[in-house]
Image (cartoon, rainbow, N blue to C red):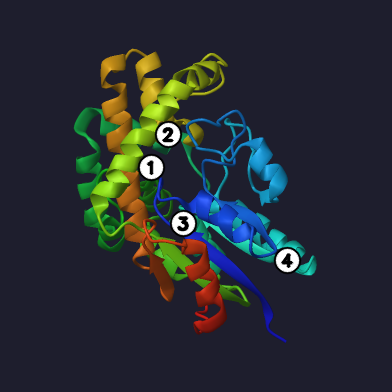
Amino acid sequence: MPEPDIIFLMGPTASGKSALALEIARRLPVEIISVDSALVYRDMDIGTAKPPADIRSQVPHHLIDICDPAEVYSAGRFRTDARALIEQISARQRVPLLVGGTGLYFRSLQRGIARLPVADAGIRAQLEADAAAHGWAVLHARLRAVDPEAAARIHPADPQRIQRALEVYLLTGRALSSHLADRNADPLDNRVHKFVLNFSDRRRLHDRIETRFHRMLEAGLLDEVRALYRRGDLTCSHPSMRLVGYRQCWQHLAGEIPFSRLPEKGIAATRQLARRQLTWLRQEPGATWLDPSSADLAGKVLKSLQLAPIQGA
């Protein structure tokens, strides 16, 4: 007997995924599983565009507010958590609706996780120092020399992934891409319906990103980050503080950038994130792409669920 269906709703930041998920929830018996590396953190609400409590009370949401910002939430942990939730939601005769823009999480859920070494603080500190001295472009070139396949996938402006790929190579003597090829697949047995939101006119997404970032600042994003900054146990090296918006606010509080440049820096970083997310999403097989500016998106999703052939993970 086939496993129950699940729905993937993917897209870059600010593309309208949350709003569409809620509209789908009004028409289908779904529970939402967040596929977002930012929403897992407590006390980080404004900069993550976290769904408010009243919305979450109307539709069950999962994998939100499950970690302290000092914790590291990995793709492997996400995979374990998400698979357990898919089973539980399906047992309740409801449909798991996985919503987010973290491509690595979607991929790990579908294809499995490679057995990679744990992080090494010493190596990471050295790579951070090298980047501070020479720039991440130089480290990306270093990665290209030892792992051209990984370098081709990782954007030169993505320091976290550049650092991790070099760290894995330095710890194991093997390229990250070689480790990923050896991953334990254990794929999903569920039938997966995939949808990707993306504006046909990129300027629409850029405008939404700019508007949203300004609204976040008006809503108190800097105060939110200031409270985290004052805790004393967080640094800019924590994954939570590397998130777009948070990183730039942290840099301002540390005296590295003036407030006048904060919006510009935050908007530029968010646009870079959206480009990286779209790079991941273009590699998703069997996905139906939808323009968020189209009318009745939820209706289009429901029609596709009823009529389109199911694309496996």
Of tags 4 and 2, which is closer to the observer? Answer: 4
Q: What's the distance in space between the residues labelled 4 and 1, CA to CA?
A: 36 Å
Q: As displayed, is residue 68 above or below residue 299?
A: above
- Amino acid carrying mark 4 in the image: Arg
Residue occupied by mark 3: 104
Provide the secondary structure element on which disc 2 rests: helix
Residue occupied by mark 2: 242
Q: What's the distance in space between the residues labelled 4 and 3, CA to CA?
A: 25 Å
Residue 149 spot, x, y in % from top left: 29, 63
Determine crowd level at label 1: few under 14, some 14-19, many 20+ residues with C-alpha closer than 10 A.
Answer: some
Q: What's the distance in space between the residues labelled 4 and 2, CA to CA?
A: 35 Å
Q: N-terminal of the two: label 4 or label 2?
A: 4
Is any atom of residue 140 visible in this view? yes
Residue occupied by mark 1: 160
- Amino acid carrying mark 3 in the image: Leu
Q: N-terminal of the two: label 1 or label 3?
A: 3
Residue 65 spot, x, y in % from top left: 64, 38
Of tags 1 and 3, which is closer to the observer? Answer: 3
Residue 159 spot, x, y in % from top left: 33, 41
Residue 163 spot, x, y in % from top left: 36, 43
Quadrant position of the N terminus in the picture: bottom right
Q: Residue 25 versus residue 170: which sits nearer the camera?
A: 25
Q: What's the distance in space between the residues labelled 1 and 2, CA to CA?
A: 8 Å
Q: N-terminal of the two: label 2 or label 3?
A: 3
Q: N-terminal of the two: label 4 or label 3?
A: 4
Determine crowd level at label 2: few under 14, some 14-19, many 20+ residues with C-alpha closer than 10 A.
Answer: some
Q: As displayed, is residue 289 above or below residue 217?
A: below
Mark 1 vs 2: CB contact within 8 A: yes
Q: Residue 75 versus residue 215: which sits nearer the camera?
A: 215
Q: Splitting the image into 4 quarters, where does residue 266 fall?
A: top left
